[in-house]
Image: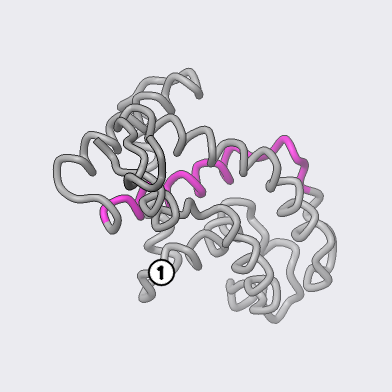
Amino acid sequence: MFKIFGKKKIKEDVVANVFINSILNTIDKGFPEIVGIINDAPEFTTSPNLHVNDDDQFALIVFAANISYIPTHLRDAKEDRITNLIYSKLSNVFGCDQEELEKAIKDYQCYLTKVNHPSKNMHYAMSKGIYGKYNLNDFQDEYFKNMKSPNPMLLKRLDEAMNNFIWNWDSFKDKYQII
């Protein structure tokens, strides 16, 4: 459709594909940058030496956060259908059972909520999730290691980087009408 006539119409199935492919592409291109931020962080006494192939936990963190944003942008049945399509297609991508994938992502969502309590900001929870899932506390100086808390400077850099991993529903909905 032409933009002068309104938003381009897009089916729910296509929305799920675009969502997944966009996030996977962002993870593939962006995770090496995250690895660089972490491995080169001056806040660590020794480098964690993460490898760019260690992105499984990161992918789950990113998908858990992004899926948790869906209810704020879509309503009721549309939200449920698109989320289910995302789980279905994502389980095919990862070659696993859909129910297992849903459980894993929901477990990650619970984990992110827990590590970021009392804040409900999932964006910041992603950084704290990376800190926990990659055992970064082990590489901090004694002060922060004993507090079992991430150095705020590292957390700030990760928070800024996480902006790139949040799917922009507002921009998407400005261009498309989901049918």
Residue 8: percent from the left, percent from the top?
A: 36, 39
Using the image, determine if residue 34 lies above or below residue 25: below
- Is 36 displayed left or right of 172 in the figure? right
Nearer to us in this view, 116 or 45: 116
Q: Main secondary structure of the magenta part?
A: helix
Nearer to us in this view, 50 or 45: 50
| Figure quadrant of residue 29 | top right
Q: Which residues are magenta?
A: 50-71
For residue 47: magenta? Answer: no
- Is 24 displayed left or right of 33 in the figure? left
Nearer to us in this view, 90 or 104: 90
For residue 69: magenta? Answer: yes
Task: Please report the residue visible at 30 percent of the width from the left and 27 percent of the height from the top.
Answer: 99
Q: Which residue is mark 1?
A: 121
The C terminus appears in which quarter of the rendering? top left
Using the image, determine if residue 165 lies above or below residue 53: below
Residue 13: percent from the left, percent from the top?
A: 33, 27
Q: Is residue 106 visible?
A: no
Nearer to us in this view, 108 or 122: 122
Mark 1 Cα-neighbour bin, 10 Å: few <14, some 14–19, many ≥20: few
Residue 85: percent from the left, percent from the top?
A: 31, 29
Task: Please report the residue visible at 67 percent of the width from the left and 38 percent of the height from the top.
Answer: 28
Task: Please report the residue visible at 36 percent of the width from the left and 76 percent of the height from the top.
Answer: 118
Q: Is residue 83 visible?
A: yes
| Figure quadrant of residue 72 | bottom left
The N terminus appears in which quarter of the rendering? top left
- Is 69 displayed left or right of 138 in the figure? left
Helix or strand or loop: what does disc 1 sit on? loop
Number of numbered markers: 1
Residue 169: percent from the left, percent from the top?
A: 40, 53
- Three-letter amino acid code at the position of disc 1: Asn
